[in-house]
Image (spheres, rainbow, N blue to C red):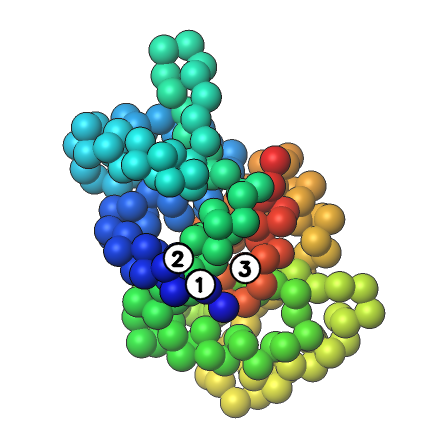
Amino acid sequence: MYKLGVYMKMKDITDNEMKAILLVLKNPAEEFNARSMSKHLGISHMGALKIAKRLEKEGIFNSKKIGRAIIYKLNLNKSYSGQYVKFLLQRENESANPYVKRWINELRKITSASMIILFGSVISKYDSAKDIDVLIVIDKGKFSKVKKSIEEINLINQKKIHPIFQAKEDLKKNIKSEDKVILNAIRGLVVLGEDVLLEVLKR
């Protein structure tokens, strides 16, 4: 649960501030300054700088100077930042396309998973996607339960789940080694297990 004051502050975040936070979160292999951030967000350099400075003031971003550039990273070691990011990940799901939302609800039935991220063509092509790409983080001993849940969902849906399974430590290693498949997957929608994602992304 969020404290009322914190929740009200979160609700006041602008769409571009939300996009900036999620951009930095979901692209851990990249380093963002205001100029590169502006290109991804489709706004002016000054607009991106204003957002980055505000988020740094709020304690959401950290900054460091590399040469002439100021690089911004998420301050995930601060509990408030973690709450903020989790709120935005949930808000991102709520604003998804209705077809994508249906799959988010289907995937929440896989209760034995530690983390689930929906990614791939379904995010942009919706019901035109051929299958449903999902990154699933599981603990040892829970694979059979997760597999059974996937089989049950596949049985009643025309499109089938295409899972990528990872243990938490493997996910951390693959992000660190900049595995392209995993880096692409974590850009998707976090269905459940926001805490797990934040934990593996901490530096």
Element marked by disc 1? loop
Q: Is residue 56 visible?
A: yes
Q: CA distance from mark 3 to mark 2?
A: 18 Å
Element marked by disc 3? helix
- Residue beneath the point at 24% across and 32% down: 50
Disc sitting over residue 40 in the figure: none
Residue where numbered disc 1 is placed: 3
Establish if 114 lies above or below 24: below
Residue where numbered disc 2 is placed: 6
Residue where numbered disc 3 is placed: 194
- Report whether 36 appears left or right of 43: right
Establish if 105 lies above or below 173: below
Q: Position of residue 55 (x, y in %)?
A: 35, 39
Which of marks 1 and 3 precedes in the sequence?
Answer: 1
Q: CA distance from mark 1 to mark 2?
A: 5 Å
Viewer-side label of 3, 2:
2
- Residue beneath the point at 38% across and 45% down: 21
Q: Nearer the viewer, residue 84 or 30?
A: 84
> Label 3 amino acid?
Glu
